[in-house]
């Protein structure tokens, strides 16, 4: 019960909490989490670095967090180090680059005159859209994405695909928002998910009238998928400290006598690292 969590367990928990939009402001405001994530960016385990980047990416989706993230001591320098390090896997470099550019754009937007709010907003939202030519976003509706075990299966399938940068699940809607390299096809994602034999993906696109349309993928076409060997697998769901993601919000907000999960993580970080 009192066992010390290891770095991968801690960063995976922070990543899972940051994936919930309702937790992002609280995580950024916590005094220990951002410094800890920055330290994780220099960790020797590449999966720790990748999970830390995913957590920061999720936090940066909240516009109100971006200036705090950009100004946090060591953030921009650590992102640059990840991008420039020769041993950094390609997908990790790309994710670090997107976060760096997003935070840079936020700083530029804050210093620009207010007469062009539309263009500034467009700049800040680029990494969820299509203006970054090196990457694109695919939205999938996944039939069979019913519970945490199916989510774990889907995670494992996507993580094995070379060219997948990151993904976010919307379990209630049975959707997965996947960030991929521009040369990877949505069909490759669908093929990997179909290989689970219990789930089937459809692509979500907007029709001419602005309404969402579900586009099925060919049933018979098996797309050859290049395997991702740069990164180790995530911890299985049952090994993750967060087995009940629906309770993540109460964990963030229920810090009683320093016993909240974020408090425990911050204590772990302060005991394990120093500037």
Image (spheres, helix red, strand yellow):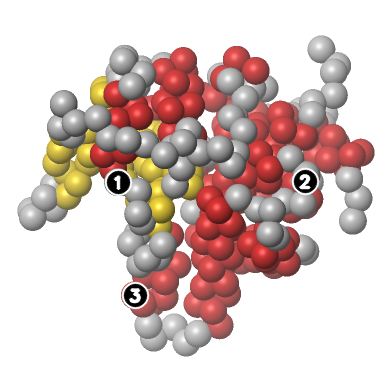
Which of the pair 112/229 is nearer the observer?
Answer: 229
Q: CA distance from mark 3 to mark 1?
A: 30 Å
- Identify the image quadrant of the C terminus: bottom right
- Marks 3/2: CA distance? 38 Å
| Residue under pointer 3 | 118
Q: Image height check: is 142 above or below 27?
A: above
Residue nearest the viewer, comparing 235 with 108? 235
Residue 185 - label: 1
Q: Which residue is mark 2?
A: 43
For the residues labelled 1 and 2, the Cα–Cα distance comes to 31 Å
Can the viewer see residue 122? Answer: yes
Query: In the figure, 211 relative to 79: above or below?
Result: above
Image coords of residue 117 (percent x, y)? 38, 77
The image shows residue 87 at horizontal and vertical percentages of 69, 53
Callout 3–callout 1 Cβ contact below 8 Å? no
Label 1 crowd (10 A; few <14 / some 14-19 / many >=20):
some
Query: What numbered label is drawn on residue 107?
Result: none
Residue in the image at 54% along x and 79% along y: 108
Asked which quadrant contains residue 150, the reply is top left
Counting residues from the N terminus, which is met first, the one under dot 1 or under dot 2?
2
Compared to residue 239, the image places residue 57 above or below, namely below
Q: Position of residue 136 (x, y in %)?
A: 36, 55
Compared to residue 210, the image places residue 17 above or below, namely above
Residue 167 seen in render: no
């Amino acid at each position: 019960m009192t066992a010390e969590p290891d770095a991968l367990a801690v960063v995976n928990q922070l990543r899972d909490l940051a994936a919930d939009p309702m937790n992002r402001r609280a995580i950024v405001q916590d005094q220990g989490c951002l410094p800890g994530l920055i330290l994780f960016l220099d960790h020797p385990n590449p999966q720790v670095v990748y999970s830390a980047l995913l957590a920061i990416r999720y936090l940066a989706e909240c516009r109100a967090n971006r200036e705090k993230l950009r100004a946090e001591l060591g953030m921009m320098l650590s992102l640059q180090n990840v991008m420039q390090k020769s041993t950094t896997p390609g997908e990790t470099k790309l994710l670090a680059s997107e976060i760096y550019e997003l935070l840079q754009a936020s700083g530029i937007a804050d210093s620009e005159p207010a007469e062009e709010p539309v263009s500034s907003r467009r700049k800040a939202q680029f990494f969820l859209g299509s203006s970054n030519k090196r990457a694109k976003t695919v939205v999938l509706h996944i039939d069979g994405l019913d519970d945490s075990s199916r989510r774990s299966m889907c995670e494992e399938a996507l993580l094995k695909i070379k060219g997948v940068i990151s993904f976010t699940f919307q379990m209630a809607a049975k959707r997965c928002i996947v960030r991929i390299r521009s040369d990877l096809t949505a069909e490759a994602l669908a093929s990997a998910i179909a290989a689970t034999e219990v789930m089937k993906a459809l692509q979500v696109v907007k029709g001419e009238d602005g309404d969402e349309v579900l586009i099925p993928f060919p049933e018979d076409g098996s797309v050859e998928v290049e395997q991702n060997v740069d990164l180790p697998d995530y911890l299985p769901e049952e090994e993750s400290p967060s087995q009940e993601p629906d309770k993540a919000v109460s964990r963030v907000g229920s810090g009683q006598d320093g016993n909240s999960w974020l408090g425990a993580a911050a204590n772990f970080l302060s005991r394990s690292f120093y500037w």
